[in-house]
Image: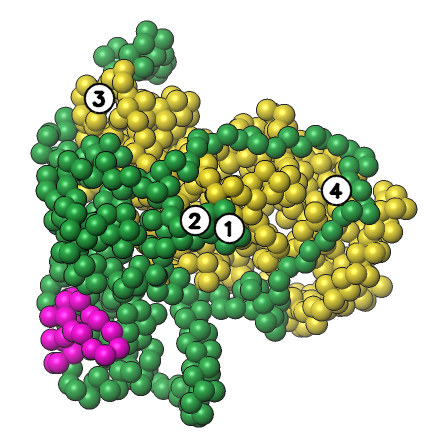
Chain colours: A green, B yellow
């Protein structure tokens, strides 16, 4: 297409429009990409299987990988935690009033699942899984959606042949799909017009409406709001008295803790700001005081090596195997010292 | 302007929804002037400053005229006045699980002209903003090309540059309101929208350098961020107007906007303009990746879904008045707003005061550019009457912005994306403005 006479002519003309030099041969800018360089970055997978790496995997092995790296957000059964994406269920709901769009009910190609897990998951550690883990996890998510059997060996050769339930459910954009005439008078019948007003209390409008019954304006604020509502709900059931958090003066952090803040934000905060997977929230002093009593060293060991407790699960280094022990240690100190 | 039947309608609506126009009369603008005070001003009461002090007002010499200000390079990179601190991006936290994969909205209620300042361009990240060293950033072009190439930033900036003013809009703009109105502010109903002057190189120039093979019909564009955000783009778009850009509004891209390099597909849904662009692969078919199957596909009422819904169709909204900008004075009122279309230029905008029963043309003002925000204006008078005010844009293809009822008839209410219907503000007797829907 770019080698058509017209296109070449346009380029030459364009290049010669600049006074001085005319590059009839083009610009000669850039360097050749080597096969090795391309192989390192060429991560994409297509529905026909192009791009899949050699190898295979299955749901039996995928279960552990999934529970280690995925379940904290997507739920042990793919049901989704909080507002994180639901992966399973929803079959037959796409035409319902409230459709549930999941891998099983909506995604048209299995290749998309492999591609996306490899390029973007786990959320806090993208590109950290090896091909074997990606095959296993892909197989497990397909298995949870009843698309393949538990012992099906998903491979470079057969992934493109896995048929997804909603593969035929898509068609190419056919807009414009409405034609509104540019009417100027008597364009609507007043007798049949209906007016609906906005729901109050769902928009963060505190910045221009004083005293508005508005939700929080930030994600951390929203988390706090939901946590306090949850605490109220539980207190109403248990009869326990709600203790308002006591504001304390911030004390200076150690250099190590301050150095850990960046790691906390990039790696730990996904779970430790929201309490995902039972993670103690950084602003939940009670949850931390119990843990700090066990000694900071033990917390660091748990963070480095992983830990499974009654309330949740902490993968080694939070799933970020690439982090140094020092970075993880500093991030733990940041969270611990944030309690003081 | 209003026919008797329209007046009746408005009265009926006022009566039927009395709580709408009264429930927030207690509201005061943080700027310090209440609606009531604004009304009092009409009666000849002199206007005082928001702080209530008069020492800086005539006939007194203001305090800042009796002393020195700060010197040059006090702020080597300047900031807006501290009195503009309310003009910021905002988010609706419950829309997303957390802030790293989330969206914020531009304060379009406060913006003038058609250019969005760099610090106020709406944000959409799928894995947060990466911190990229431009010396270590590369753009790779490979696939169905004769000469796979790698460009440094220095390489890319050697190509002849082009600068174009284009809007970028998230296809989910307005998407919270398919079922009914629920956002009480313009920033949240329409703020996933910005417009900048972008500088870079046409992608077709780079692809020419690589030599696209005849089977090459699509490209995959991919980001260097943790999401490695990827979209398939048909080659026709690239031949038309796709740019690889490194600057916005005269300076290098902001990190939030893809520093040091992003794609720009003018007029198309924003997510196709891949940020932190690191790789272009040429292929013979689309890739059907997550952001073009699971997301950014439009689910119709029958349970089937449209894919590759690239273009942002003709749309408009009134920015003055709006919920954040209530009418503060009776008398002259410039009704202003913005219109845009992904199919070319805005041809015109009509305004209705009666919920769409009758319309009159507004004026386009300032620059009217291809796939750019276009400002419209109608000089009017307001004497306290209730309005159901709407704007309706049409573009050079003849497409007229549709009603919500027309869109729902075609699509149902579950498509999330591409809701470009005529928007209604209800102006109450004290000048307050509410978001409502007329069907």
Q: In which quarter of the image is the N terminus of chain B?
A: top right
x, y percent for residue A315: 17, 67
Q: Which mark identifies residue B261? A: none
Q: What element carries label 3?
A: loop
Of the residues tagged 3 and 2, which is closer to the observer?
2
What is the C-alpha distance between the residues marked 4 and 1? 31 Å
Q: In which quarter of the image is residue B400?
A: top right
Q: Name the residue under label 1.
A: A96
Q: Are marks 4 and 1 in contact (CB under 8 Å)?
A: no
What is the C-alpha distance between the residues marked 4 and 2? 38 Å
Q: Which mark identifies residue B145? A: 3
Q: Are marks 4 and 1 on the same chain?
A: no
Q: Name the residue under label 2.
A: A92
Q: In this view, does B197 lie to the left or right of A27?
A: right
Q: Is residue B325 above or below residue A170?
A: below
Q: Is mark 2 on a helix, strand or loop?
A: loop
Foreground residue among B305 and B403: B305
Q: Is residue B404 above or below residue B238?
A: below
| Pointer 3 chain | B
Query: Which stretch did the figure color magenta?
Result: A297-317
x, y percent for residue B276: 30, 42
């Amino acid at each position: 297409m770019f080698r058509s006479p017209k296109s070449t002519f346009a380029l030459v003309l364009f290049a010669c429009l600049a006074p001085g030099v005319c590059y009839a041969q083009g610009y000669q800018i850039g360097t050749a990409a080597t096969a090795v360089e391309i192989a390192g970055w060429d991560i994409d997978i297509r529905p026909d299987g192009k791009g899949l790496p050699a190898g295979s995997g299955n749901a039996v092995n995928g279960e552990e990988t999934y529970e280690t790296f995925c379940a904290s957000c997507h739920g042990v059964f793919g049901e989704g935690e909080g507002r994180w994406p639901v992966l399973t269920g929803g079959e037959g709901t796409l035409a319902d009033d409230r459709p549930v769009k999941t891998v099983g009910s909506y995604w048209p190609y299995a290749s998309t699942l492999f591609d996306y897990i490899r390029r973007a998951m786990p959320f806090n550690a993208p590109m950290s899984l090896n091909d074997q883990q990606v095959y296993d996890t892909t197989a497990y998510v397909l298995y949870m959606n009843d698309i393949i059997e538990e012992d099906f060996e998903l491979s470079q050769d057969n992934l493109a042949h896995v048929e997804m339930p909603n593969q035929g459910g898509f068609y190419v954009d056919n807009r414009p799909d409405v034609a509104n005439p540019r009417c100027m008078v008597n364009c609507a019948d007043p007798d049949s017009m209906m007016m609906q007003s906005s729901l109050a209390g769902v928009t963060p409008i505190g910045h221009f409406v004083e005293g508005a019954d508005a939700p929080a304006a930030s994600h951390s604020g929203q988390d706090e709001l939901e946590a306090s509502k949850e605490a109220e709900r539980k207190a109403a059931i248990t009869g326990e008295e709600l203790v308002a958090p006591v504001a304390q003066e911030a004390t200076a952090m150690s250099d190590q803790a301050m150095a850990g803040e960046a790691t906390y934000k990039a790696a730990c905060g996904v779970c430790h700001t929201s309490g995902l997977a039972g993670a103690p929230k950084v602003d939940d002093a009670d949850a931390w005081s119990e843990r700090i009593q066990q000694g900071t060293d033990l917390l660091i060991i748990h963070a480095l090596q992983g830990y499974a407790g009654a309330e949740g699960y902490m993968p080694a280094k939070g799933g970020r195997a690439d982090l140094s022990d020092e970075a993880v240690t500093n991030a733990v100190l940041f969270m611990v010292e944030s309690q003081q | 302007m209003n026919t008797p039947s329209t007046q009746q309608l408005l009265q009926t609506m006022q009566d039927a929804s009395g709580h709408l126009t009264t429930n927030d009369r207690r509201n005061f603008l943080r700027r310090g002037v209440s609606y009531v005070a604004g009304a009092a001003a009409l009666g000849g009461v002199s206007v005082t400053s928001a702080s209530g002090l008069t020492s800086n007002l005539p006939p007194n010499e203001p305090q800042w005229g009796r002393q020195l200000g700060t010197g040059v390079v006090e702020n080597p990179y300047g900031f807006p006045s501290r009195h503009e601190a309310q003009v910021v991006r905002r988010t609706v936290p419950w829309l997303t699980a957390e802030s790293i994969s989330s969206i914020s909205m531009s304060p379009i209620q406060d913006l003038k002209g058609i250019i969005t300042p760099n610090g106020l361009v709406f944000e959409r990240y799928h894995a947060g903003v990466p911190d990229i060293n431009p010396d270590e950033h590369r753009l790779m072009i490979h696939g169905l090309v004769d000469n796979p190439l790698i460009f440094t930033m220095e390489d890319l900036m050697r190509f002849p540059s082009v600068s174009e003013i284009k809007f970028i809009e998230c296809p989910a703009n307005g998407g919270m309101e398919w079922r009914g109105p629920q956002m009480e502010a313009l920033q949240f109903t329409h703020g996933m929208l910005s417009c900048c002057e972008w500088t870079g190189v046409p992608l077709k120039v780079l692809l020419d350098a690589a030599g696209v093979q005849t089977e090459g019909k699509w490209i995959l564009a991919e980001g260097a961020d943790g999401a490695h955000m990827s979209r398939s783009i048909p080659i026709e778009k690239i031949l038309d107007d796709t740019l690889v850009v490194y600057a916005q509004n005269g300076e290098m891209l902001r990190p939030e906007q893809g520093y040091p390099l992003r794609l720009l597909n003018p007029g198309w849904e924003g997510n196709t303009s891949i940020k932190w662009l690191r790789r272009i692969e040429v292929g013979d078919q689309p890739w059907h990746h997550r952001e073009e199957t699971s997301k950014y596909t439009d689910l119709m009422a029958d349970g089937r879904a449209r894919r590759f819904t690239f273009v942002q169709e003709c749309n408009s909204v009134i920015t003055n008045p709006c919920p954040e900008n209530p009418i503060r004075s009776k008398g002259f009122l410039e009704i202003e707003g913005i219109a845009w279309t992904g199919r070319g230029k805005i041809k015109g905008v009509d305004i209705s005061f009666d919920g769409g029963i009758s319309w009159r043309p507004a004026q386009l003002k300032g620059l009217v550019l291809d796939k750019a925000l276009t400002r419209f204006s109608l000089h009017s008078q307001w004497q306290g009457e209730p309005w159901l005010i709407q704007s309706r844009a049409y573009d050079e293809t003849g497409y007229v912005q549709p009603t919500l009822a027309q869109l729902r008839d075609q699509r149902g209410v579950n498509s999330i994306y591409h809701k470009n219907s005529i928007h209604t503000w209800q102006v109450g007797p004290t000048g307050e403005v509410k978001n409502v829907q007329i069907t």
